[in-house]
Image (cartoon, grey):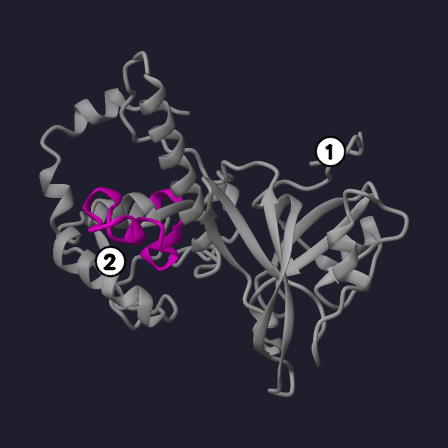
């Protein structure tokens, strides 16, 4: 695959939020409407993904293919068959044109855009039977895009994992660890298509959040549950700790449930709105079964299994 030799430093951080008009187009140029922007005087092709595209039949999604996480990105064209021209051709030829491919995620109308990183074009295929804006079936062009940085981890570093001893790893063990990390990365990427911000605080900048499983990784029945974006929440560190330990949970309708054993002094000092019965947004049906597991197995249970919190505190490490 050809590589780019551009010294232009990216003015964006993965996971951070930016105004499309003021911080993306004003800085890079390009079309201010649509899903693909091709600035003439900047070494970039800028792509936008998000829920708005679904009304035109777009369904961007992540797949695990040949050991790598690949984004399937739908090309532009709201009516009729998509054509290999304009923005679509700019994606396919970005390497030949010495352009870097950047992707931003829309968080909703009048909301900022989240930078998802830099990507490379791999392959394009046609998908029949996709509806256009008027509801007519048409042919779509779907691009397979590979993230430049495969280990997607813009989130707040985990600080409550015990340090592991240094060991010699066999080739098989190293491969298994690589595969686990890749699957964890896939889970995080898929989670962003489901959740946009912390349910408790409203924070949307990934650098201040954690990607938290609803049904814990170790308790999942199979690999599909572990990489299912619906089995996750974006939570700030404090909220993640409370949710992971079972001090709080959520009903299927988004109602916050707080353990009666959570000390009042902690509630008053922790800096989070933990009002019992507070509405924290709607959940999709695909999330509700995982939340039911959390209410039945994790809530009011996990914190009781911590036999020695002091030993855990001394064992923590910041990565």
Q: Report whether 105 appears left or right of 233.
A: right
Q: Could you tell me which residue is drawn at 36 percent across and 20 percent down?
A: 171
Residue 127 lies, in percent from the top left, at 58, 69
Which residue lies most toward the right here? 41
Q: Report whether 101 appears left or right of 210.
A: right
Which label lies toward us, 2 or 1?
Answer: 1
CA distance separating discs 2 and 1:
47 Å
Dot label at residue 249: 2
In the rendered image, which quarter is residue 81 located in? Answer: bottom right
Residue 214 lies, in percent from the top left, at 28, 53
In the rendered image, which quarter is residue 285 located in? Answer: bottom left
Number of marks = 2
Q: Could you tell me which residue is drawn at 29 percent across and 62 percent down?
A: 275
Residue 235 lies, in percent from the top left, at 39, 50
Residue at mark 1: 3
Q: Is residue 67 above or below residue 178?
A: below
Say if residue 28 shows up in the picture.
yes
Is tag 2's residue or tag 1's residue first in the polypeptide sequence? 1
In the image, residue 233 lies in the stretch drawn in magenta: yes
Residue 70 lies, in percent from the top left, at 53, 48
Q: Which residues are magenta?
A: 214-238
Q: Report whether 182 appears left or right of 289.
A: right
Q: Helix, strand or loop at disc 1?
A: loop
């Amino acid at each position: 695959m050809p590589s780019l030799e551009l010294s232009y430093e990216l003015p964006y951080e993965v996971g951070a939020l930016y105004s499309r008009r003021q911080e993306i187009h004003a800085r890079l140029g390009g079309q201010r409407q649509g899903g693909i922007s091709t600035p003439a005087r900047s070494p970039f092709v800028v792509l936008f993904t998000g829920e708005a595209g679904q009304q035109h039949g777009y369904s961007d999604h992540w797949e695990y293919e040949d050991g790598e996480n690949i984004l399937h990105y739908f090309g532009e064209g709201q009516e009729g068959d998509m054509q290999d021209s304009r923005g679509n051709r700019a994606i396919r030829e970005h390497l030949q044109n010495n352009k870097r491919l950047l992707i931003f995620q829309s968080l909703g109308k009048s909301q900022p855009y989240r930078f998802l990183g830099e990507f490379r074009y791999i392959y394009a295929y046609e998908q029949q039977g996709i509806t256009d804006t008027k509801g007519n079936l048409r042919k779509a062009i779907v691009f397979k895009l590979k993230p430049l940085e495969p280990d997607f981890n813009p989130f707040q570093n985990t600080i409550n994992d015990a340090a592991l001893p240094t060991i010699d790893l066999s080739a098989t063990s190293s491969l298994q660890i690589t595969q686990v990390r890749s699957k964890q990365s896939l889970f995080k990427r898929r989670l962003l298509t489901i959740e946009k911000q912390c349910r408790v605080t409203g924070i949307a900048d990934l650098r201040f959040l954690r990607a938290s499983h609803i049904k814990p990784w170790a308790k999942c029945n199979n690999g599909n549950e572990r990489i299912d974006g619906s089995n996750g929440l974006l939570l700030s560190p404090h909220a993640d700790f409370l949710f992971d330990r079972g001090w709080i949970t959520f009903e299927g309708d988004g109602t916050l449930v707080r353990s009666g054993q959570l000390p009042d002094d902690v509630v008053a000092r922790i800096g989070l709105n933990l009002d019992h019965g507070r509405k924290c947004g709607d959940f999709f049906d695909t999330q509700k079964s995982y939340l039911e597991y959390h209410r039945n197995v994790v809530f009011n249970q996990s914190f009781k299994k911590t036999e020695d919190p002091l030993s855990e505190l001394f064992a923590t490490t910041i990565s």
